Amino acid sequence: MALYFLKRLLLSVLVVILVVIALFLLTYAIPGDPARVALGPRANPELIAEFRARMGLDQSLATQLYNFFVSLLQGDLGRDAISGEPVLNTVLSQFPDTLYLVLGSVLVALVPGVILGILSARYRGGIIDRISSVLSVSVMSVPAFVIAIYLLLVFSIQLGWFPAIGAGTGFWDRLHRLVLPSLALGLAWIGYIARILRASILEEMNEGHVRTARAFGLSENRIMYDYVLRIAVLPMITVLGIGIGQMLSSAVFAEVVFGRPGIGKLVYDAIISRNYPIVTGTVLVTTIFFVVVNLGADLLVAWLNPKVRHDLSR
Amino acid sequence: MSEKNALEVRDLNVSYKVPGGKLRALRQIDLIVPRGEIVGLVGESGCGKTTLMQTILGLQSSAAVIESGQIMLGDTDLLTLGPKQMRGVLGDRMSAVFQDPMKSLNPVLTIGRQMTDIQFRSKASQREKRARAVEMLEKVRIPDPESRLDRYPFEFSGGMRQRVAIAMALMAEPDVLVADEPTTALDATLELTTIDLLRELQKEIGCAIIFITHHLGVVAELCQSVNIMYAGEMVESGPTRAVFDAPQHPYTELLFACDPAQIAERTRHLPTIGGELPSLINLPPGCVFEGRCPKAFAPCADIHPRIVTSGGSDMVRCHLRDPEVTK
C-alpha cells in the first residue's frame, strides 16, 4: 500500500507538471499581444516594450517556461495583468463558490444515481431499469450548458421558482440559488452513475459469496446492502473522481449562464480580456484540485479493500 | 413420507428455457436421503447434479422451470414454498457447502461478521453469537479461533476457508446438508482431512448429507448409498457397497472403469467413455446412454427403459436388467 501510495503520488505530480507545460505553451500560442490588450489600443510602442520587459514577455520560450516553474514553486502564480493583484489570491477567493457548485452537482448526480442504480439492478429489465437506460443515454448526450439554459427558461423564467442569476447571500439564499446550476452540471451524471452501479451490482450478484449468503437464508435486502453494495460501489467512486473534473470544466458554462461568481466565471472573463496570468493560475489550481480528488478517490477505493488495508498495516 | 427420510425428491422434472426450445435438464429424478446418512450423488459434468442441488436449495437460475415433482423436507414440500418461506428453511433446517472455497465467502467482511450474520434467527446477543462462532471454528479445528474471527477470508488458506464454510453450514445443526463438491478444489491430503472432519461432525450433529462429487473414492469412503446420474436422469441408486461390488447399469460400470484409483495395470492412456452426451433439447426416444453404451441392443435406441430393481441396487434404468425385456 505504501508503495502504491508513492507511485500514485508521483504520477499525480507528473500530471501536474505536464499540465503546467501544456498550459504555458497554450497561452504562448494564443494569438494577440497581451501587452496591447492590457495597455489599450492607444498605447505607444515604448510603453508596450516596457510592459513586455516587465512581464518577461521579451525573453525566449525556454527562459519564460523556466521562470514560470520557479515562480510556481514559490507559490507565485503571477499578478493579474489588469488589476495587479496576486493571481493566487484572486483564484482562491473565487474557488469556494465553484466548490459549492461542484459539491451540489455531485449530490445531484449521486443520490438519484445510486437509488436508480440499485433499483434497476434489483428489478432488472423492469420499467425503472428501462427508463433509466434510455434517460442516461439521452441526458448524457446533451451538453451541460444546453441543460442550464433550459432549466433557466423553465424554472426561473416560466415558473419563477428559482432566481435566475447570482450566488446570493446567507445560507438559505445561497442554497436556493445553487439548485439550478447544480442540476445543470449533475443531471448528466445521474444516468451514468446509475448504469455503472447497476452493472457492478449485477456482476457481484453472480459471485459465489452471494449464493452462500442466499443458502443461509439471508434476506435480499441484507445481501444487497451489506454484502454486494460494499463491493459494487468501488468502480462508481473511481468514475465519480473523474466526473468531478468534468463538472469543473462544465462549471465555466454554468457560472456564465447563471451569472455566478466562481473560477469558471473568472477564467471566462480572463480569456475575453486576455488576462493570461489569471487563466493559467485558474487552470493550474483547478488541475491540482482535480488531481487531488482523483488521488483521493483511488486511495479511498484501495482503503475500502480489506486486502489492501491489511498489506498496509504490515 | 416415511419418518426415516430427511429429504425425498420425487419425480422431479426441471427444464431451462433456451433459444432453441426447452432444455430438459432433469427428468423423473427420485432421490432418497435417509435421516443421518451420507448420500453420494455422482455424475460427469453436465449430468444435472448442479441443477438438482440448486433446485433442492431453491437457488436455481431464473431460466429454470420446475415442471413437476416434489422435494419433501420432512412434511414440507419445498417446491410449494414462496421465496420468503424458503429463506426460513435455508440456514436452519437445510444448509449448504459449495465447491470453491476461494469464492464462497464474502471478501470484504470478516469471518466473524459472516458467521454472526447467519445467526440472524437467534435472539442471542452479539457476544453470544460470537461465542457460538468460536465454538464452531474450534470444532472444525481452526487454530486460535477467537482472533481469527476478525480476519478476512483472504487471510485463510483454501483448506481453512472450506472448514470455515463447513462450520457455518453446520452451525444451525440442519437436518440436511447439501455439499456440492466441497473437496474438489482442495489437494489430496486436504481432501482426506476435510472428509474426515465432515464425517465426524455429521456423526455428532446427526444431519443427513447429500454429497455431490465426481470422485468415486470419496463416495466409497464416505457415503452409505450412492446415486448415479447421467444426462439428467438417475440411472442407478443403491447401497454403496452393493453398487460398487456389482454395478448394474453399463454407465456405472464404465464410470468405475475410468476411475484412476481402480486401475491395476500400467497403461499409457487412461480409459475414457467415448462419444458425447445426447442433446437435452431434442432427446433421443430410447435410452439416453444408448449412443455411448457398449452393451446397447435392439430396444435401446427406440424405447426409453423403465426403472427396475436389480442385483443389490435399489433402482436401475436399463433394458439389460429388465426381465420383461430380456426374457
Image (cartoon, coloured by chain):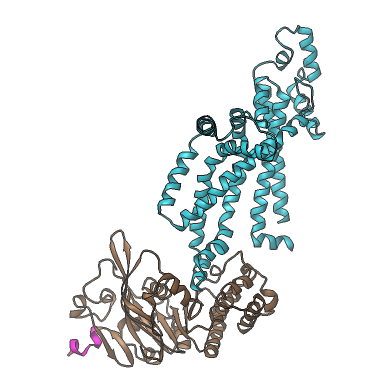
Chain colours: A cyan, B brown
The residue at the point 70 percent across, 9 percent down is: A41
Q: Quadrant of residue B274?
A: bottom left
Residue A148, percent from left and from top = 54, 33
Residue B6, percent from left and from top = 42, 86
Residue B137, percent from left and from top = 62, 80
Q: How many marks?
A: 0
Instruction: Give the side of residue A272 with respect to residue B50, left or right.
Output: right
Instruction: Give the side of residue A257 with respect to residue B25, left or right.
Output: right
As displayed, is residue B141 above or below residue A72? below
- The quadrant the N terminus of chain A occupies is bottom right
The part of the chain drawn in magenta is B319-326
Q: Quadrant of residue B138?
A: bottom right
As displayed, is residue A43 above or below residue A93? above
* Residue B322 belongs to the span the image colors magenta: yes
Q: Main secondary structure of the magenta part?
A: helix
- A201 or B218, which is in the foreground? A201
As displayed, is residue A13 above or below residue B324? above
- B326 or B4, which is in the foreground? B4
Instruction: Give the side of residue B168 with respect to residue B89, left or right.
Output: right
Residue B229, percent from left and from top = 35, 78
- The quadrant the C terminus of chain A occupies is bottom right
Residue A189 appears in view: yes
Q: Quadrant of residue B171?
A: bottom right
Residue B263 appears in view: no
* Residue B169 belongs to the span the image colors magenta: no
- A189 or A14, which is in the foreground? A189
